[in-house]
Image: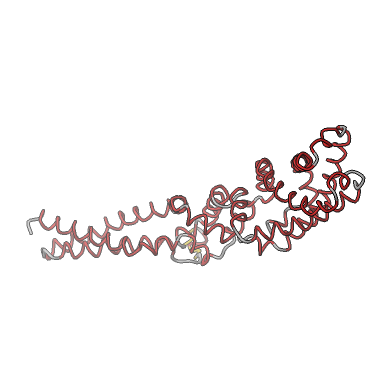
């Protein structure tokens, strides 16, 4: 769906000048290497004509290239694997993302624990007033600390499905899931800003086996394009370099193109970011996820350390209860 947004007409309209500069640079380097004296003697109008012919052939070449890339995109590029690799390599970014999307939920845990601790503390006080048992304070503290943290975490994700009550005025649903629309947009923006964008996509493809497939597609169509240029300019090119050298020139074109493309990376990346518009694609997808699936965006973070949060609440409850017992002379 992402690559389908690339249309040849829009591609040439936006990247035509960049493509022309790249073709001109490739032609210049080849000419200076194989026939520098002849190239320097050629009139400028002839050079311009050669550049125009190569650019014209390149435009014809890129149409089937784009078609082949679309047809083989699943073998060339795995966007899910790219996102996973990026977050594994940059763990601080992963932590920051979860802190951002879960900031209200983390605050909610603190507030619920405090409020519930207050009300349960009143119950604890009544028990102490009636029984005056020293053990009751640390034991009740253990229960209160553990239970309040458990309740807060549970209220974040449960119930999963919305339950509309009081004539539609109250939506009884997990706090995180209530915020799905807002969180989805925030997460989409963060992903497209820090994880999945043009430069990262290009870097990922270059490191994978899919890059060789991209090169193969380019080389196949490039050779056809060169054959077309030679066929039209056979009075010029074969005389200077010989027909046997054409095979070597084809390989050189690929190499020089790879060397030249980084000089135009800014224009290419801007085109990709603007055309792919990933935020417009990912945001609605996240907002449209069923609550059961959307829960998985944040739930694993709590599940991994949930035991620690609950244990810490219980331990602190015991400590506070013990201090209370000493303070009350028990």
Quarter of the figure with the C terminus:
bottom left
Of residues 106 and 236, the one drawn nearer to the viewer in this rendering:
236
Q: Is residue 14 visible?
A: no
Residue at image coords 56%, 61%:
81
Q: Is residue 44 rendered to the left or right of residue 288?
A: right
Q: Is residue 15 rendered to the left or right of residue 177?
A: right
Name the spot of residue 286 as percent of width and height, x first.
57, 58
Name the spot of residue 288 as percent of width and height, x first.
59, 61
Residue at image coords 15%, 59%:
322
Q: Quadrant of residue 79?
A: bottom right
Q: Quadrant of residue 35?
A: top right
Name the spot of residue 126 as percent of width and height, x first.
18, 61
Name the spot of residue 27 as percent of width and height, x first.
78, 42
Q: Quadrant of residue 29?
A: top right
Of residues 145 and 261, the one drawn nearer to the viewer in this rendering:
261
Instruction: State whether residue 280 is above or below residue 148.
Output: above
Q: Is residue 129 visible?
A: yes
Colour mode of the rendering: secondary structure
Instruction: State whether residue 210 is above or below residue 262.
Output: below
Quarter of the figure with the N terminus:
bottom right
Number of marks present in the image shown? 0
Instruction: State whether residue 230 is above or below residue 294.
Output: above
Residue at image coords 16%, 62%:
137
């Amino acid at each position: 769906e992402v690559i389908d947004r690339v249309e040849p007409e829009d591609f040439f309209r936006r990247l035509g000048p960049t493509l022309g500069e790249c073709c001109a640079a490739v032609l210049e380097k080849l000419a200076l290497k194989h026939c520098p004296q002849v190239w320097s003697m050629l009139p400028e109008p002839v050079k311009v004509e050669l550049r125009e012919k190569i650019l014209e052939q390149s435009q014809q070449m890129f149409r089937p290239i784009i078609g082949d890339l679309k047809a083989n995109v699943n073998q060339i590029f795995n966007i899910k694997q790219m996102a996973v690799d990026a977050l594994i390599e940059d763990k601080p970014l992963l932590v920051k993302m979860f802190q951002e999307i879960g900031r209200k939920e983390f605050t909610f845990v603190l507030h619920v624990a405090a409020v519930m601790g207050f009300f349960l503390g009143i119950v604890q006080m009544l028990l102490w007033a009636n029984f005056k048992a020293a053990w009751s304070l640390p034991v009740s503290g253990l229960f209160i600390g553990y239970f309040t943290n458990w309740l807060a975490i549970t209220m974040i994700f449960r119930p999963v499905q919305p339950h509309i009550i009081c004539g539609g005025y109250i939506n009884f649903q997990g706090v995180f899931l209530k915020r799905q629309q807002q969180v989805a947009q925030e997460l989409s923006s963060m992903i497209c800003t820090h994880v999945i964008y043009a430069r990262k996509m290009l870097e990922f493809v270059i490191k994978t086996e899919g890059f060789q497939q991209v090169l193969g597609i380019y080389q196949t169509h490039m050779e056809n394009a060169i054959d077309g240029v030679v066929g039209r300019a056979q009075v010029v090119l074969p005389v200077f370099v010989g027909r046997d050298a054409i095979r070597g020139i084809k390989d050189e074109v690929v190499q020089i193109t790879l060397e030249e493309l980084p000089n135009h990376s800014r224009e290419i990346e801007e085109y990709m970011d603007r055309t792919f518009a990933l935020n417009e694609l990912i945001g609605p997808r996240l907002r449209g996820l069923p609550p059961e699936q959307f829960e998985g965006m944040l739930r694993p973070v709590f599940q991994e350390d949930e035991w620690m949060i609950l244990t810490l609440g219980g331990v602190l409850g015991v400590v506070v209860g013990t201090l209370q017992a000493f303070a009350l002379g028990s």
